[in-house]
Image: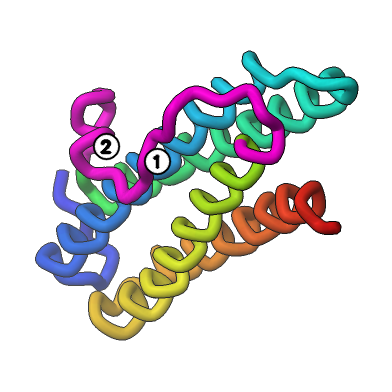
Amino acid sequence: MKVNIGVPEKHLQEVADKLQVLLADEHILYTKTRNYHWNVVGDNFSEMHLFFEKQYGDLAEIIDEVAERIRMIGHYSTGRLVDFLKLTNLLEPEYTSKQSEQIKNLLDDHETIIRSLRELITEFSDKQKDLGSSDFVTGLLRQHEKMAWMLRSYLAK
């Protein structure tokens, strides 16, 4: 059934396409965070193991929300890893068990997503006239800013 929410289908398609990229970025960041959860080492192993677990748990919820937003506006969500790798803006670095590198890598990814979300907020509201999706990504911006702050706090000297 077609979606009739006061936003032209062409605009909903454009929003869905942008959200697919965001969904891919969220998946890559989730996987990277989970990898670091598994492979962290150091005298604060327990703390970092739990810290990464909390972060990937939050990302899992974000992933679900992004996929459901795509469905709400009448489109199917991408769900194959091969598609995520084609769409993502994020890079996968070499394996590392060094906490400072892990944290810096995750922080860089959150900040990349934050910059993208800032652009999407105004694009969705001004160009596509989809205030619901604009508000949705504004909420995600706050979540990523908080996660980035938490990561940044480990790097402060």
Please tell me which residue is depicted at 19% across the width and 38% down the height of the picture. 86
Earlier in the chain: of badge 1 and badge 2, it is 1
In the image, taking residue 144 as reference, residue 89 lies left or right, namely: left
Residue lying at the far bottom of the rendered structure: 126
Task: Using the image, tell me which numbered label, if any, was put on residue 25.
Answer: none
Location of residue 94 with respect to 122 vertically, above or below: above
Q: Amino acid at mark 2?
A: Ser
Residue 128 coordinates in the image, percent (x, y): 24, 75
**Residue bearing mark 2:** 77
Q: Is 54 covered by the magenta stretch?
A: no
Residue 120 coordinates in the image, percent (x, y): 37, 69
How far apart are the two marked residues, 1 and 2, measured between alpha carbons? 8 Å
Q: Quadrant of the N terminus?
A: top left
Please tell me which residue is depicted at 48% across the width and 26% down the height of the picture. 31
Q: Amino acid at mark 1?
A: Glu
* Nearest to the observer: residue 45 or residue 16: 45
User: For numbered disc 1, what is the local secondary structure?
Assistant: helix
Q: Is residue 38 visible?
A: yes
Q: Quadrant of residue 153?
A: bottom right
Query: What segment is highlighted magenta in the picture?
Result: 76-101
In the image, taking residue 71 as reference, residue 75 lies left or right, namely: left
* Nearest to the observer: residue 139 or residue 27: 27
User: For numbered disc 2, what is the local secondary structure?
Assistant: loop
Q: Quadrant of the C terminus?
A: bottom right
Location of residue 70 with respect to 40 vertically, above or below: below
Q: Is residue 132 visible?
A: no
Q: Is there CB contact under 8 Å for labels 1 and 2?
A: yes
Task: Using the image, tell me which numbered label, if any, was put on residue 68.
Answer: 1
Q: Quadrant of residue 36?
A: top right
Residue 56 coordinates in the image, percent (x, y): 61, 31
Magenta span: helix, strand or loop, mainly?
loop
